[in-house]
Amino acid sequence: GALMGGLALGFLEETLFRGLVLRCFYTLFRPWPAILLCSAFFAYTHFKHPGALFSSANLEPGFASGWLVAFHTLFGIFQSFAWLPFLNLLMFGNLLCLVTLRTRSLMSAAGLHAGAVFVMLSNRKCFHIHPDEGRIFWGGGGIIDGIFPLILLTLLTIWLAVTVRRQGA
């Protein structure tokens, strides 16, 4: 399940975020503003919304339920916002944008994204993460809520940004 979920999410999300959103921003702005805007949008849409938003909705598929889902997707982040997961997702989005620009291919970013989802899903299924003091540093089951993943993603992004700049991409 983790492998299939990783492959499906990696391919579909990279097609949407890097194939469409990054390309739109890239045609309007210089590379760095485009990368930051695409990554911020990526982080925003991946931010988990509280289940209470949808529990009382009694959603039947239809026009009205679509508007309700759209409303909560746009404004739900304000009810449960946390900086650490948002920054981790922002840095991961930056890394995926840079991989796409360096390789000039969505498949490399899709592979990286699929691998990250696979690790995250496998980590949740195989390990029980206790909510202790170490969790803030290492991260929990989703990995995005730790300081160590943020440091690692930041270092990888800086390294890739330097190599992309040297190559003139």
Image (cartoon, helix red, strand yellow):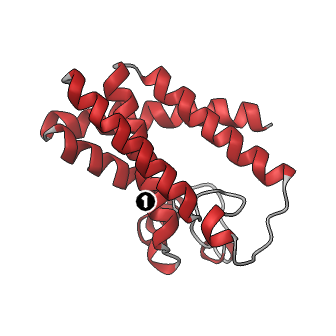
Q: Is residue 94 visible?
A: yes
Measuring from the top left, give residue 28's x and y in whole percent. 13, 39
Measuring from the top left, give residue 68's x and y in whole percent. 51, 67
Residue annotated with mark 1: 44
Quadrant (top left/top right/bottom left/bottom right) for the C terminus: top left
145 shown above or below 22: below
Q: Which residue is drawn at 31% across and 27% down?
A: 101
Q: Which of 5 and 162 is in front in this view?
A: 162
Dividing the picture into quadrants, the one containing residue 83 is: bottom left
The answer to whether 141 appears left or right of 30 in the picture is right
35 shown above or below 101: below
Residues packed near mark 1 inside 10 Å, few (<14), some (14 to 19) or many (20 plus): some
Q: Can residue 67 be seen in this view?
A: no
Measuring from the top left, give residue 14's x and y in whole percent. 47, 33
Q: Which of 145 and 52 is in front in this view?
A: 145
* Amino acid carrying mark 1 in the image: Tyr
Quadrant (top left/top right/bottom left/bottom right) for the N terminus: top right
Dividing the picture into quadrants, the one containing residue 49 is: bottom right
Q: Which residue is drawn at 61% across and 40% down?
A: 116
Q: Is mark 1 on a helix, strand or loop?
A: helix
Q: Residue at x 32, y 39 (%)?
A: 21
Dividing the picture into quadrants, the one containing residue 90 is: bottom left
Measuring from the top left, give residue 63's x and y in whole percent. 51, 57
Q: Residue at x 41, y 65 (%)?
A: 74
Count how many numbered circles sit on residues in the image: 1
134 shown above or below 167: below
